[in-house]
Amino acid sequence: MASRSRAHADTGTKLEQNLHVFQSDHFDADAFVQSKCHSLNEKEIRQLCSYLLDLKRASAEEMRRSVYANYTAFIRTSKEISDLEGELSSMKNLLSTQATLIHGLAEGVHIDSLSDVVPESTLDRSSTDEFREPSDLEKWLTEFPDHLDVLLAERRVDEALLSLDEGERVASEAKEKKTLGHAVLLSLQTAIAERRQKLADQLAEIACQPSTRGAELRAAILALKKLGDGPRAHSLLLNAHYQKYQFNMKNLRPSSTSYGGAYTAALSQLVFSGIAQAATDSLAIFGKEPAYTSELVMWSTKQIEAFALLVKRHALTSSAAAGGLRDAAECVQIALGHCSLLEARGLALCPVLLKLFRPSVEQALDANLKRIEESTAALAAADDWELTHPPSVTRTSGRPVGTVLGSTGAYQHKLSSSAHRFNLMVQDFFEDVGPLLSMQLGGKALEGLFQVFNAYVNTLIRALPGSMEEEASFEDSGNKIVRMAETEAQQIALLANASLLADELLPCAAMKLAPLANHKDDLQRRASDRQSRHPEQREWKKRLVNSVDRLKDSFCQQHALDLIFTEEGDSHLTAEMYINMEGNADEIEWFPSLIFQELYVKLNRMAAIAADMFVGRERFAILLLMRLTETVILWLSQDQSFWDDIEEGPKPLGHLGLQQFYLDMKFVTCFASQGRYLSRNLLRVVNDIISKAMSAFAATGMDPYSVLPDDDWFTDIAQDAMERLSGKPKVATGERDLNSPTASVSAQSMSSVRSHGSY
């Protein structure tokens, strides 16, 4: 985690440094382009454009991450600012009302104090006004409160709003022109405020009733907004939609036998349609004002959290615990499908939903992988390690199990029973990984599957005879009971299982984790493009192959030890077998030593078995035989006791021992070349061994080249030995086949030996 944080910090620092030139207030775009492009050719200009595009994408991604990381705090702050503005507005209205009341009371007292002294002219005018008709304004002032009461009683909202607006206009003009006494104006303002509050309460009551639907709800909310109580109106709108879908959810009753996908679909339809309608109404009535948009996002997030809790409780938890990745994935896909429809209304809430569902899907993923591992291990305990074609089982994709698409069309490979089961479960596993990509769980799926495959390889290693001493290395690998692979054919079958899974079947299935290509693309080109576009999958396949190499090494080590050592622990390959050859050369029948004869016979036998098991994958068989040959020769090269006896023993290496030793090494290079598994490393080691033996002989004071026959002599004996040991008839003319792979080996190996220098 610390390294990841440091990497993220380094990336951010690098991005900041790259963008520093653009942050200056005096940045000149023309001068910047001119400085970069003045001496650039077309290719360099394209590279610069690509570099700028990368910076643009990196900047946009950094901004997106920053906004998303602080989005909750931003929304909370915006909501608090909105609430504060509303409270300030209420306080302002309250202070204004109190000031008006105080002024009214003061003027009322002043009028009463002057009422005892009324001018005569006023009395005269009053006596004449008793018979004057009231003006239109006076009539309107008298009728206005009653008219508003009638409109409110009849719930004629639009007309009431118009009347209130008219009253506000009259009061404003009267106050400005002083056409009304203060007491009358105060009475008018009080009547307007009381009716406004009464209308607001009526509208709120309408909005809160479950029976209010559609246009009626929107009209009530809009009217309440026009009354100046926007925050309350918006909250009532969201609550109305919440109550609506909550009421509809009463009929949705999940049961223990209900299908999780069906429950999720029904619940998603109710919740997300409610959120979508609330977003539509909010946008239509309140527009994109930040305060209301923020409240909508917070409310929607809260509804999604409650929705996710219900889905996890009634659908995801049970399937995830049982390893039902397909059921869990389907529930998530259904929910994401509904949630993505909100993006058209400006609500990108899929990341929130993914974050909520991720733990459950991870649990299902882990349980699914554990089930694959345990099921495969159980089958390995009874596997007879006989390769067969896959059973006639068809997956949901329509192709039979084990079918692989290649350049030659569809063909089937042979595996043992446990490997067939492993492959079937893996193929089904990758059929269910759709939502894992959007949750960024593709890497976790690949890593988990690698661990499961690695555990299966450990099981195959334990199936090799003589490998029980390595049991301590696999304490964490699960079930240790496994049926031994007694015969060479069964042991090679272990390698066939692992290599086919690692090289073809698992990587082919893992391609489903790659983003889908255009359907117009050719299938084969699409497969190759996926491999080229996704280095993480190439790295994953490399890890699979490396795991198979562990099995291959164990196989070769075990067979090499069987060749070199007897059952009692004595070595078949000792220095005495060469040192003690001195005597009558005429009595010696020159032939390769017994251990190398057995190596050749074993390799021929394994090659015949592998030819049937590795159809279409002959290269793996060749590499296996190459590795086994190298293991034996490397052991000889690194056996210090052997070379101590050769170089410093009580008896020096004689010319007959050197001749036999050279013949054995020549025999190895000949049959390795004939079998096409003479690697450069093997040839190098053989040459080094020969050089060490010749150096030991030269230390006695004799020239090794003076006692060794011509190179053709060794080649003829090696060729004759291969024919006799393999049961092949000799060439009728007695001459070697010039087209044989061994024709060029002798010259190559001998020249390599002599090129090591003089002795």
Image (cartoon, grey):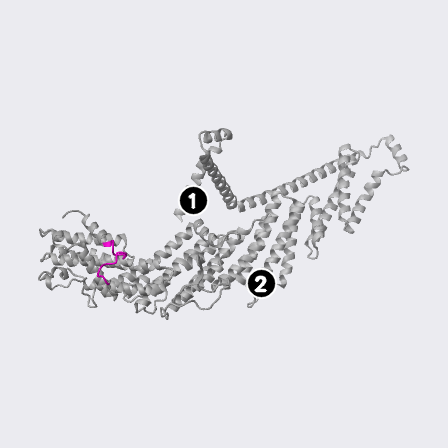
State the image coordinates of residue 626 (x, y, percent, origin top left).
28, 58
Image position of 1 with respect to 631: above or below: above
Position of 186 with respect to 446 (left or right) is right
Image position of 405 with respect to 187: above or below: below
State the image coordinates of residue 130 (x, y, percent, origin top left).
89, 37
In the rendered structure, find residue 8 and report the number of the disc placed on it.
1
Numbered range of the magenta stretch: 732-745
* Circle 1 crowding by C-alpha within 10 Å: few under 14, some 14–19, many from 20: few
Q: What amino acid does circle 1 point to? A: His
* Residue 741 located within the stretch drawn in magenta: yes
* Residue 335 located within the stretch drawn in magenta: no
Q: Secondary structure at mark 2?
A: helix
* Circle 2 crowding by C-alpha within 10 Å: few under 14, some 14–19, many from 20: some
Number of marks in the rendered image = 2
Q: Kindly identify which residue carries mark 2.
A: 262
Q: What amino acid does circle 2 point to? A: Ala
Residue at 66% across / 51% down in the picture?
237
State the image coordinates of residue 624 (x, y, percent, origin top left).
31, 59
By secondary structure, the bulk of the magenta-drawn segment is best described as loop
Which marked residue is nearer to the observer: mark 1 or mark 2?
2
